[in-house]
Image (cartoon, rainbow, N blue to C red):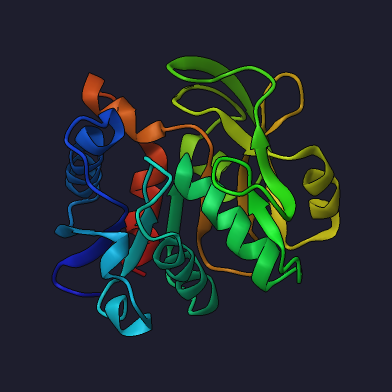
């Protein structure tokens, strides 16, 4: 184990974004609970040009607040973590772009697109039927998964700040993929995924890191740090 874990926070830092305010607190809290040292570094998407820019990190967190300044940098971070067994967490925009990267580079959907940014291609990320900006919702978790083990239960309530999620057609295409759906809302809409061929690759549409602002633990952040230290 490294004397201090190095966590890459991939995204375009904005002090006004609530999730960006919460993330350092969530990491510090998780590190304290686990009795380990963890350093976090904001890594702007414009500064990610190749894999060398990511090589020094023990874990990668693709953070909220998209569209990103450099979408290719965000997708490269997700791909690098996926291909190199680097513990990965994606939240909100990070969830959406982890899905987009997987669709293009694993499933062969080269024209996979995100409706917030793209006018052409096969939309894998589409507008939600109902906005989840500053909404809370109940999520049912698949048993015996990283996310269910982290929370220690199979039903949770978390908050969102988003208008986009997985498109219905793509949800059907995911059914036989190693990228398993591990969380749903009460209507069956996908809210969390995990890559079962990877030591720790978890992405959620909800922003669980915001718990830290209320002094509550963020179990998936603890799980990320634990995975990065083993």
Q: Nearer the viewer, residue 166 or 230?
A: 166
Locate residue 212, reporting x and y percent.
25, 29
Q: Residue drawn 63% across and 36% down?
A: 165
Q: Residue drawn 56% across and 17% down?
A: 137
Left/right of residue 75 with respect to residue 125 in the rendered view: left
The number of numbered discs placed on residues in the rendered structure image is: 0
Locate residue 192, reporting x and y percent.
60, 41
Which corner quadrant holds the C terminus?
bottom left
Q: Nearer the viewer, residue 222 or 13?
A: 13
Left/right of residue 9 with respect to residue 90 in the rendered view: left
Left/right of residue 85 with respect to residue 46 in the rendered view: right
Locate residue 102, reporting x and y percent.
64, 64
Is 139 located above or below residue 165 in the figure? above
Q: Nearer the viewer, residue 184 or 97?
A: 97
Which corner quadrant holds the N terminus?
bottom left
| Viewer can see residue 217 | no
Occupied quadrant, residue 36: bottom left
| Viewer can see residue 132 | yes
């Amino acid at each position: 184990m490294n004397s201090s874990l190095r966590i890459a926070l991939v995204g375009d830092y904005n002090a006004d974004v609530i999730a960006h305010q919460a993330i350092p607190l969530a990491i510090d809290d998780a590190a304290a609970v686990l009795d380990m040292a963890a350093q976090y570094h904001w890594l702007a998407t414009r500064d990610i040009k190749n894999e060398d820019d990511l090589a020094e990190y023990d874990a990668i967190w693709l953070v909220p607040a998209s569209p990103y300044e450099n979408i290719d940098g965000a997708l490269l971070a997700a791909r690098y973590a996926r291909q190199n067994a680097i513990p990965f967490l994606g939240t909100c925009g990070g969830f959406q772009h982890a899905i987009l990267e997987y669709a293009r580079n694993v499933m062969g959907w080269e024209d996979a697109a995100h409706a917030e940014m793209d006018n052409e291609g096969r939309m894998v990320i589409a507008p939600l039927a109902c906005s989840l900006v500053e909404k809370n919702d109940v999520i049912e978790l698949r048993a015996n998964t990283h996310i269910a083990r982290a929370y220690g239960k199979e039903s949770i309530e978390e908050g969102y700040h988003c208008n986009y999620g997985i498109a219905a057609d793509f949800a059907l295409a995911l059914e036989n993929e190693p990228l398993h759906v591990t969380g749903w809302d009460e209507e069956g809409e996908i809210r969390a995924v995990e890559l079962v061929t990877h030591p720790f690759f978890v992405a959620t549409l909800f922003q669980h890191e915001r718990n830290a602002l209320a002094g509550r633990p963020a179990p998936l952040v603890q799980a990320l740090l634990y995975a990065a230290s083993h």
